[in-house]
Amino acid sequence: MKTIKVGLLGLGNVGTGTYKTLEMNRKHIESNTGLSIEIAKILVNDINKKRDILVSPDQITQNIDDIILDPSIDIVVELIGGIEPASSYMLKALENKKHVVTANKAAVAANFDDLMDAAKKNQVMFRYEASVGGGIPIINALNTALLANEFEEILGIVNGTTNYILTQMTEYGLDYADVLKVAQEKGFAEPDPTADVEGIDVANKLSILISLVFGIRVPIEDIPTEGITNISKEDIRLADQFGYKIKLLATAKKVGNQLEAHVQPAFVPKDHPIASVSNEFNAIFVTGNAVEDLMFYGKGAGPLPTGSAVMGDVIEISKAIAKGAAFDHHTESKAVKMLRYVGEGQNKYYVNMMVKDVPGVLGSISTTFGAFGIGVDSVLQLSKDANINREVPLIFILHEVTRARLDEALNKIRSSKFASEIKSIIRVM
Ligand code: HSE
């Protein structure tokens, strides 16, 4: 049986999950492919770290060149995370004619063109299925089965950690910090969970999806991004009262010849399928002009679901090597001509503010919104929640408006004698 040799960069949560996926299903993979896949070398930071898998000392190295320059290694699997040194390692591996597989959304989003170009130039394959949606095969679907479509919209929950936190806060009234700790223990979160909770991880994934779906590169710095750190239990309770759940959404949609995109927490109507996506599960909706609406659903984080996606790429490449097939690159541009990226568009918003409980407040604030062309969809005043200064929460759901226009109106309201604090502003889907 032909053996394909793999060099693994990194043996953290995803590295261990990949190793376990291969060992767990080795017989099945061998009988399906007629190939033996061997993890020949593993790059680690700490040789003495205790691990829950058995690796022989011969397999471990701290020197990247032991993998990248080893002529017997066919595929380099990068699971270190972070933009650097991961990107340089991958580029060097590609230049040394190694096929590369990665789960690293930050590196792929930052260096999409360079990585694709290096693979093409060196006639090797570059695959990154695990970088978006964990175990969900969204990248493969977009690069193969859905190629006949032009797309109108992508909408998704693509971060397991934040979806886990929001679900636990919603279902069990748990505190943000406690749930984050559990998500880290379960291996969902990034080594530095700031990328998860501030929405950066989602922006990386959305940038990759935009490249594939709309054929234009939008760096994450250009995607308006907000995480979940300001979401309070009160927002979650009020969302429930209005008939919504709060989810961290990635959105990109064509409006005429413009592309709008943003990453933000949003009120999602409870009867929308995405509202029932819980815990570490992810879901990605795409709307193609031939296929119409599609929803991909599955575990978006965790060692084994992510290991499944990594191994899928490794097996696809191994089969191509064994067949001596020409290596495909998935790099042809599917650019939607004349599409202009504009950032955030118009949205409905929930606004929660504290106001003085005196006659005329509601009228004055609604009039100010009206003066800025902002219509009120629903309003709720909760006198039972008055504080000791006799200020009460006043909650609005507002009709479509740009965030810039809303901020102008809220600045005017803030400077009035009625409103003491704008507590939350959250998009409504
Ligand atoms: N930290 C990521 C998440 C891992 O929670 O979704 C998968 O990309």
Image (tube, helix red, strand yellow):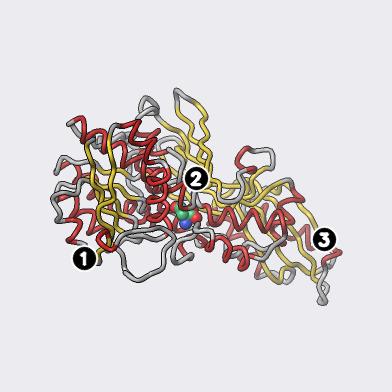
Q: Is residue 315 above or below residue 71?
A: above
Residue at screen point 70% across, 49% down: 376
Inspect the image, locate mark 1, and give the three-letter code of the amino acid beneath it.
Asn
Question: Is residue 391 among what the camera can see?
Answer: yes
Question: Is residue 224 among what the camera can see?
Answer: no
Instruction: Give coordinates of residue 34: x percent, y percent.
Output: 28, 32
State whether label 3 is within 8 Å of ligand 1: no
Of label 2 and label 3, which has the lower sequence position? 2
Q: Which residue is labeled 2 in the image? A: 251
Cα distance, mark 2 to mark 1? 40 Å
Cα distance, mark 1 to mark 3? 62 Å
Of label 1 and label 3, which has the lower sequence position? 1
Instruction: Give coordinates of residue 312: x percent, y percent.
Output: 36, 39
Q: Residue 63 has which mark? A: 1
Mark 1 crowd level (few <14, some 14–19, many ≥20, 10 Å Cα):
few
Drawn side of residue 382 relative to residue 76, left or right: right
Q: Residue 400 has which mark? A: none
Of label 2 and label 1, which has the lower sequence position? 1
Mark 2 crowd level (few <14, some 14–19, many ≥20, 10 Å Cα):
many
Cα distance, mark 2 to mark 3? 32 Å
Single out the residue that lies furthest toward the bottom: 388
Name the element at disc 2. strand
Inspect the image, locate mark 3, and give the three-letter code of the amino acid beneath it.
Leu
Quadrant including the N terminus: top left
Single out the residue that lies furthest toward the top: 290
Q: Which residue is labeled 3 in the image? A: 382
